[in-house]
Image (cartoon, rainbow, N blue to C red):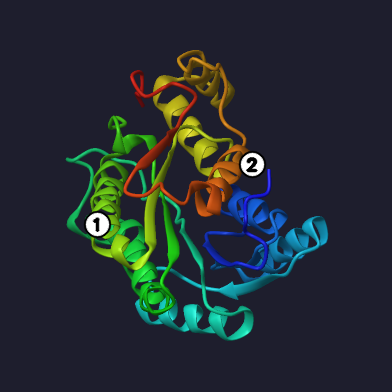
Amino acid sequence: MELGLEGKVAWVTGGSAGIGYACAHALAAEGARVAVSARDPERLARAAGRIHDETGNECMAVELDVNDGGAIARAAGEVSSSLGPIDVMVSNAGGPPPGTFLELSDTDLEDGLRLTTTSAWRLAASVVPSMKERGGGCLIFITSSSTKEVIDGLLLSNTARAAVVGMSKTLSRELGPHGIRSICVAPGRVSTDRSAALDRKLGEAAGISEAESRARRENRIPLGRYADPAEIGSIVAFLASAKASYLTGVTVLVDGGDSTTVTA
């Protein structure tokens, strides 16, 4: 299927590994000119190089800490100057640390919201004016299945990601008349470093190994496994494409059917 992404400019944050890398790879494979951002310059350069080598399409690395609002604006300008106006923005950031209400502090709350919610707001703000001028664009926010059913022990993530969903829905109404679509993608468990860390922490709490912790979790997922990051990337590429041109204001749940059995 031709998705109509040939020549489009896409910017993906958290793009050096995991879901972000998979999204950038999928977009580049469909012909988009892609920029990837992350904090570690070496990992980022390697990721951009792999995407270019494997897809044959342009992929530039733009170092960025999404906690820094000024840096977000500068990075958006760098992408636009090098590749052209941004057509697709994929907001993807690592999740806040786990913890319960009595374990977390005000500082934890502020840091978690800045990483997950404020960064998404600022990323959108950095690209929307240009999209509005050109009469179109697509905002995609990577959230979590916790926006459909909260996950025990992940209070900060549950709170911050739900706020992103509210923002995206509102943006879909405000920006729809300008041809700008806004969509959330809500993965369940995906085979990433973060999922491994959560499995390890939960395993330690239960007195079992990380592998056993993961196996217990997989047994509760109807499809019986974690997603591969590439499966999330493929969905993001479709949602960003002309084939999904009438889709906006939704949260697409990608969790292997686990939405009614989400637990820590």
* 222, above or below 117, in the image: above
Measure how far apart labels 2 and 1 are at the Cα level: 30 Å
Q: Which residue is drawn at 68% across and 43% down?
A: 1
For mark 1, does the 10 Å Cα neighbourhood hold few (<14), some (14 to 19), or many (20 or more) residues? Answer: some
Horizontally, residue 108 falls left or right of residue 222, namely left
Callouts 2 and 1 close, C-beta under 8 Å = no
Q: Which of 174 and 110 is in front in this view?
A: 174
Secondary element under disc 2, as helix, strand or loop, is helix
Up/down of 153 relative to 54, above or below: above
Quadrant housing residue 29: bottom right
Check residue 136 in the rendering and tell me which mark sits there, or answer none. Answer: none
Relative to residue 123, is residue 14 depicted above or below? above
Report the mark closest to the observer, 2 or 1.
1
Please rate how many residues cluster around mark 2, counting C-alpha atoms within 10 Å: few if below 14, some from 14 to 19, many from 20: many
Name which residue lies at 30% across and 33% down.
148
Which residue is under mark 2? 230
Q: Position of residue 160 (x, y in %)?
A: 27, 50
Instruction: List x then y, in percent, for residue 122.
Output: 34, 70
Judging by the rendered image, the residue that carries numbered circle 1 is 173
Q: How far across and down, in percent of the image, does residue 7 sit?
A: 66, 68
Q: How many marks?
A: 2
Q: Give the vertical position of 195 relative to 88 (above or below).
A: above
Q: Quadrant of residue 36?
A: bottom right
Q: Which of marks 2 and 1 is nearer the N terminus?
A: 1
Q: In this view, does 259 lie to the left or right of 104?
A: right
Seen from the viewer's position, the closer of residues 149 and 243 is: 243
The C terminus lies in quadrant: top left
Residue type at numbered disc 1: Arg
| Element under disc 1 | helix
- Identified by mark 2, the residue type is Ala
- Provide residue 87's location: percent of width, then percent of height: 51, 68
